[in-house]
Amino acid sequence: MKEHVHALPGSEVIFPQGSYTVRTEGRLPCGNRELLYIEGVMTAGSACCGAIECRIIHVPGLIVSWQHKKDRVSGNLVSLVEPVIDPAIRRDVEQLLLKTFPSSMVILES
């Protein structure tokens, strides 16, 4: 399990695959639990070829404890999440998100 610090819409989030700007955050039912996802926009490209924006769905994990405290540094709310590790559940989560958010890049933390 790990702590997830909630970012406000318009905030930039840096993670191993790059960075994105937060649009919104939400929860989706997943079996008998809830999945935390962040909808964001990632920009890719170069100065010579131009840039494009890509919608991403970043999944920190399954919610264990929702907004149970505030982060000391940012003051933002913090939730406890369990990353989706099981390959079968990961496939189910990806299918659910691609159905819910077509034409999005889905990124699941592990």
Image (cartoon, helix red, strand yellow):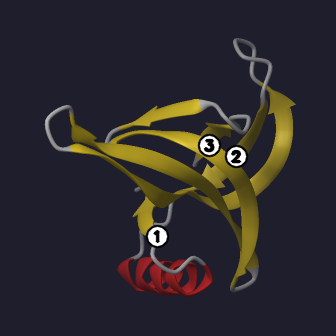
Q: Earlier in the sequence, mark 3 or mark 2?
A: 3
In the image, residue 59 lies at what x, y percent? 54, 59
Residue 16 relative to residue 31: left or right: left
Dot 1 alpha-carbon crowd within 10 angstroms: few under 14, some 14 to 19, many 20 or more: some
Q: Is residue 105 above or below residue 94?
A: above
Residue position for label 3: 22
Distance from disc 1 to disc 2, alpha carbons, whole Å, reads 25 Å
Name the element at disc 3.
Answer: strand
Tag shown at residue 104: 1
Q: Earlier in the sequence, mark 1 or mark 2?
A: 2
- Work out which residue is located at the far left of the displayed protein and give it: 48
Q: Amino acid at mark 1?
A: Ser
Residue position for label 2: 80
Dot 2 alpha-carbon crowd within 10 angstroms: few under 14, some 14 to 19, many 20 or more: many
Name the element at disc 2.
Answer: strand
Q: Quadrant of residue 75?
A: top right
Question: Residue at the location (50% across, 81% down)?
Answer: 98
Q: Is residue 68 above or below residue 110?
A: above
Quick one: quadrant of the C terminus?
Answer: bottom left
Distance from disc 3 to disc 1, alpha carbons, whole Å, reads 14 Å
Question: Residue at the location (79% across, 51% down)?
Answer: 65
Distance from disc 3 to disc 2, alpha carbons, whole Å, reads 19 Å
Q: Amino acid at mark 3?
A: Val
Q: Amino acid at mark 2?
A: Leu
